[in-house]
Image: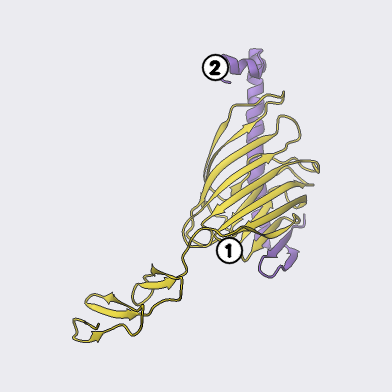
Chain colours: A purple, B yellow
């Protein structure tokens, strides 16, 4: 994938669109990887919760009621 | 009136407003009066340990200093050093290639200098709300809007606002965050409220906005300064 970078100078109003440098690409890819890990962790937690609810045969609202939550 | 130093030499103000100040142990010198409306400020790098400087003060009237379309992998807004406070609005951003979150860095600093304490409220997919979830994010490498934006969703109505305080001077910059992630289904909508600190003693000269999914397909930004 080609990444571009937009730079805006507030003083001069100048706008530049250029290709990302190797270092910038590395940072972008790293942020992407970290975010994918977070998304996977969140999805796994949701799946785990649903599996537990299925096992107990109750809904999320019922589980909340059982635990005294809102 | 001259003051006699330990060495026997006399030191005296030369003009109205001049000060005779200690410049070392048993030594003194004259600090000339500063410009109108400046205030006396400690500065260990000067000969007297003092200087005249413009008062830090609070923000003045906020004015819009930048606005435009989000494009590419990141947008850097520079030349911000003259502003004491900044307010950033990011609106309706989305990405064609992958899910992602919107993030912002100060001075392109990607080290673990950002702490954010806040909470999220999300819905449970059936019209109700989940209880708030606390989010204590210590040592982050960016300011983050919690909530994943679904790829290729042009009709998403997400937003991310950040208000920055003490941006002009050295010293830590604090920030307030409010964001809303409009997910693909009713179960993905998330509101996030937080307060944070950027733990580097420096003025804010630039902000880098990016989305972890890659290049933006749409969205706008507006930046106000004062």
Q: Farthest residue in the top direction?
A: A57
| Image mark 2: chain | A
Give residue B44's position: percent from left, percent from top.
36, 70
Mark 2 lies on residue? A68
Look at 27% across and 75% down and name the residue there: B22
Left or right position of B42 against B145 = left
* Number of callouts: 2
Residue B154's quadrant in the figure? Answer: top right
Seen at 66% across and 68% down, the residue is A11
Q: Position of residue B215 (x, y in %)?
A: 75, 53
Q: Closest to the observer: B195 or B52? A: B52
B80 versus B130 height, above or below: below
Residue ranking furthest to the front: B16
Q: Mark 2 and mark 1: span between their CA atoms?
A: 49 Å
Q: In this view, does A67 lie above or below B131?
A: above
Q: Name the residue under label 1.
A: B205
Q: Quadrant of the C terminus of chain A?
A: top right
Q: Mark 1 lies on which chain?
A: B
User: What SS does tag 1 mark?
Assistant: loop
* Quarter residue A49 falls in: top right
Indicate the position of residue B49 as horizontal and vertical percent values. 34, 72
Residue density around tag 1, few if under 14, some if 14–19, many if 20 or more, within 10 Å: some
Residue B161 visible in the displayed image? yes
**Front-most of B119 and B88?**
B88
Mark sitting on residue B175: none
B12 is higher (above) or lower (below) than B37: below
Q: Which residue is drawn at 35% across and 83% down?
A: B15
Residues at discs 2 and 1 both on one chain: no
């Amino acid at each position: 994938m080609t990444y571009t970078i937009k730079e805006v100078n507030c003083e001069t109003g100048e706008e530049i669109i250029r290709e990302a440098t190797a270092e910038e690409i590395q940072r972008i890819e790293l942020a992407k990887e970290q975010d994918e890990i977070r998304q996977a962790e969140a999805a796994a937690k949701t799946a785990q919760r649903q599996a537990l609810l299925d096992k107990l045969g109750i809904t999320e609202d019922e589980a909340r009621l059982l635990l005294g939550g809102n | 009136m001259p003051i006699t130093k330990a060495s026997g030499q006399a030191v005296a103000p030369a003009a109205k407003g001049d000060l005779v100040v200690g410049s070392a142990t048993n030594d003194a010198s004259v600090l000339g009066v500063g410009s109108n409306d400046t205030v006396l400020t400690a500065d260990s790098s000067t000969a007297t340990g003092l200087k005249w400087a413009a008062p830090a003060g609070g923000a003045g009237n906020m004015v819009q200093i930048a606005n435009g379309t989000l494009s590419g992998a990141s947008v850097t807004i520079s030349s911000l050093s003259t502003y004491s406070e900044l307010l950033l609005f990011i609106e309706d951003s989305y990405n064609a290639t992958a899910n992602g979150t919107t993030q912002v860095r100060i001075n392109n600093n990607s080290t673990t200098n950002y702490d954010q304490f806040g909470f999220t409220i999300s819905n449970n997919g059936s019209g109700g709300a989940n209880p708030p979830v606390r989010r204590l994010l210590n040592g982050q490498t960016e300011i983050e809007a919690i909530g994943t934006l679904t790829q290729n969703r042009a009709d998403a109505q997400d937003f991310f606002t950040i208000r920055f305080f003490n941006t002009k001077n050295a010293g830590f910059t604090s920030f307030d965050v409010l964001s809303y992630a409009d997910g693909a289904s009713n179960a993905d909508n998330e509101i996030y409220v937080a307060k944070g600190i950027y733990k580097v003693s420096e003025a804010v000269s630039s902000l880098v906005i990016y989305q972890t999914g890659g290049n933006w397909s749409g969205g706008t930004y507006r930046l106000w300064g004062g």
